[in-house]
Amino acid sequence: MQSLANLLAQLPWSLVIIACLTLGLAPFVPEPHIWEKLKMLMAGTLARPIDVFDLLMHAAPFLVAALKLASPLMAAK
């Protein structure tokens, strides 16, 4: 757990934000891809393995951002 916290601490916020804005949201037209996959998940139509993989890949930068935000809070405990 400590090595993950160290890795997240070394990762610059600028890189995380750029990853969220590019990989996380691309393609932008007609709507962000992650939004489309989340709508499919809520509708129950996210069934194909490629769609699940696609959701995970587009959500990964947001997950890293959330972990980077939570890491100092967890270290304080």
Image (tube, rainbow, N blue to C red):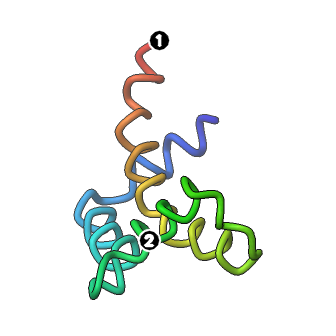
Q: Residue at x 55, y 65 (%)?
A: 40
Residue 48 percent coordinates (x, y): 75, 76
Q: Residue at x 42, y 77 (%)?
A: 33
Q: Is residue 6 above or below residue 24?
A: above
Q: Amino acid at mark 1?
A: Lys
Which comes sooner in the sequence, label 2 or label 1? 2
Residue underneath mark 1: 77
Residue 73 percent coordinates (x, y): 39, 23
Cβ atoms under marks 2 and 1 closer than 8 Å: no
Q: Secondary structure at mark 1?
A: loop
Residue 36 percent coordinates (x, y): 44, 71
Name the quadrant containing residue 62: bottom left
Residue 57 percent coordinates (x, y): 56, 72
Q: Is residue 14 above or below residue 7?
A: below
Q: Residues within 10 Å of mark 2 (few under 14, many from 20)?
A: few
Q: Amino acid at mark 2?
A: Glu
In terms of depth relative to the viewer, which is nearer, 76 or 53? 53
Q: Residues within 10 Å of mark 1 (few under 14, many from 20)?
A: few
Q: Is residue 24 above or below residue 41?
A: below
Q: Is residue 43 left or right of residue 36?
A: right
Instruction: Say the numbered circle drawn on residue 36.
Output: 2
Q: Secondary structure at mark 2?
A: helix
In terms of depth relative to the viewer, which is nearer, 74 or 19? 19
